[in-house]
Amino acid sequence: LTLGAKGQIDKGVLQNLSTACINLNIKLEIVCGKNEKLYKYVSENVSGDNVVVHSFVNNMHEIIKRCDLIITKAGGISISEAIASETPLIINKTRSLAGQEEANINYVTGQKIAIATKEKSIVEILSFLAKHDLQYQDMVKNIKRTKKESYNANMIDIITSLSNDKHDD
């Protein structure tokens, strides 16, 4: 779960998520970013043997790689790291989406690599995916396909760009 600087998740939902993870025997890693007030709150109020709380980290890519699922907002960097790590997402559709975040949600849900939901339904979606491995595995398969397609498209753009640069001389 990435909360970032603004910590855009209801604290009650956060408590429910922690309880659900305990009941489902799921490890929950929470990254609070540079928001020290949020880090202090989460560290003091969200507990359990299955909960790890981080403040700002320099190894987000490593944290994402060891996760089976990411709960985050629809920021481009989070989505890009999830695709690169082949880690499906639950997108928290916050009340205040930046313009590009709506397009990001449309992309990841269209690729079937994420489920976008209001924060009050995050626990239900997580519970569903934990109990329905086939749906989760479909998301994994789709994110691997998306990564491959994205990589291939980027390589074509790079090669075309290099080719055009060479002919411009």
Image: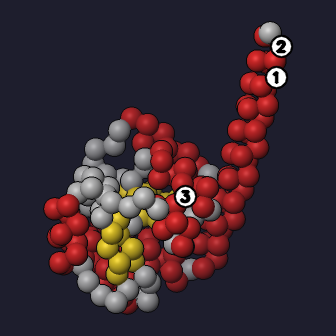
Position of residue 163 in the picture relative to residue 113 (left or right): right
Between the residue at mark 1 and the residue at mark 2, the CA separation in whole angstroms equals: 6 Å
Q: How is the image coloured?
A: secondary structure
Q: Pointer 2: what residue?
A: 167
Residue type at the position of mark 2: His
Asked if 91 appears above or below 39 in the picture, the reply is: above
- Tell me whether the residue at label 3 lies in contact with that at label 1, contact meaning CB atoms closer than 8 angstroms: no
- Tell me whether the residue at label 1 lies in contact with that at label 2, contact meaning CB atoms closer than 8 angstroms: yes
Q: Residue at x 78, y 10 (%)?
A: 168
Residue type at the position of mark 3: Ala
Q: In terms of secondary structure, where does tag 1 sit?
A: helix
Q: Residue furthest top?
A: 169
**Sequence-wise first label, 3 or 1:** 3
Q: Pointer 3: what residue?
A: 82
Residue type at the position of mark 1: Ser
Between the residue at mark 3 and the residue at mark 2, the CA separation in whole angstroms equals: 36 Å
The mark lying in front, picked from 3 and 1, is: 1
Q: Quadrant of residue 96?
A: top left
Q: Pointer 1: what residue?
A: 163
x, y percentage for residue 131? 52, 83
Question: In this view of the protein, which residue sits in the foreground, 155 or 120?
Answer: 155
Q: In terms of secondary structure, where does tag 2 sit?
A: helix
Question: In this view of the protein, which residue sits in the foreground, 142 or 158?
Answer: 158
Q: In terms of secondary structure, where does tag 3 sit?
A: helix
x, y percentage for residue 39? 23, 66
x, y percentage for residue 72? 40, 59
**Sequence-wise first label, 3 or 2:** 3
Task: Judge the density around disc 3: few (<14), some (14-19), many (≥20) Cα neighbours within 10 Å.
Answer: many
